[in-house]
Amino acid sequence: MKVRIEVTDNLKEDEVLIRCGRVDESIRKIHQFILEQSQSGPKITFYKQNQEYYFPLEDVLFFETEGDRVYAHTADDAYFIKYRLYELEQMLPRSFVRAAKSTIVNIRQIYSITRNLISSSLIQFSNSHKQIYASRFYYRELRQRLSERGNYEA
């Protein structure tokens, strides 16, 4: 594989071009890696009491509204953030998807889903006791994103 970097002064936006004879798994992974790097996600500040925290979005299991506040839940804690869910939906990477009216979930952190045909389905997370419910309305999109999950993990 030949790799080349070309610097052009008058570009308005960086561009990466992949030339290949065929698209195989390694090309897909390179493509996805480049996309993830270029869309590394928003820089969100997390708040707890009078402290500000900075950690990767990958550590977030889910975002959830409680009253008029939105909280980011990690495996062990919950942090207040200064965004609304609809704003997060616009800015978060594809690995986050709406699971209920009041919840956005990180599909990379999902360990299992207990499907319930009549009501909400239970979502459990890797390395955490926390769990949430996915509503029937959002379940189809959640399942679609989960089936794509291997396609954008590096």
Image (spheres, rainbow, N blue to C red):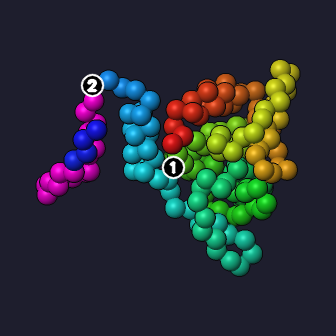
Residue placed most toward the observer, 117 or 143: 143
Quadrant of res 109: top right
Q: Secondary structure at mark 2?
A: loop
Residue placed most toward the observer, 62 or 33: 33
Residue placed most toward the observer, 40 or 45: 40
Left or right of residue 115, residue 137 in this image:
left
Q: Nearer the viewer, mark 2 or mark 1?
A: 2
Assign the N terminus to one quadrant of the image.
Answer: top left
Q: Identify the amino acid type marked 2.
A: Gly
Q: Which residues are magenta?
A: 5-21
Q: Which residue is mark 1?
A: 91
Residue 52 rendering spot, x and y as whole percentages: 64, 74
Residue 14 rendering spot, x and y as whole percentages: 26, 50
Which residue is most to the top?
117
Residue placed most toward the observer, 142 or 125: 125
Left or right of residue 5, residue 38 in this image:
right
Cα–Cα gap, marks 2 and 1: 34 Å
Q: Which residue is mark 2?
A: 21
Q: Is residue 102 visible?
A: no
Q: Main secondary structure of the magenta part?
A: loop
Residue found 67% across the figure and 54% down from its top = 60
Q: Is residue 136 visible?
A: yes
Reading the chain from its start, which is encountered first: label 2 or label 1? 2
Please determine whether, in this image, residue 118 is positioned above or below residue 55: above
Please determine whether, in this image, residue 137 is positioned above or below residue 132: above
Residue found 25% across the figure and 33% down from its top = 19
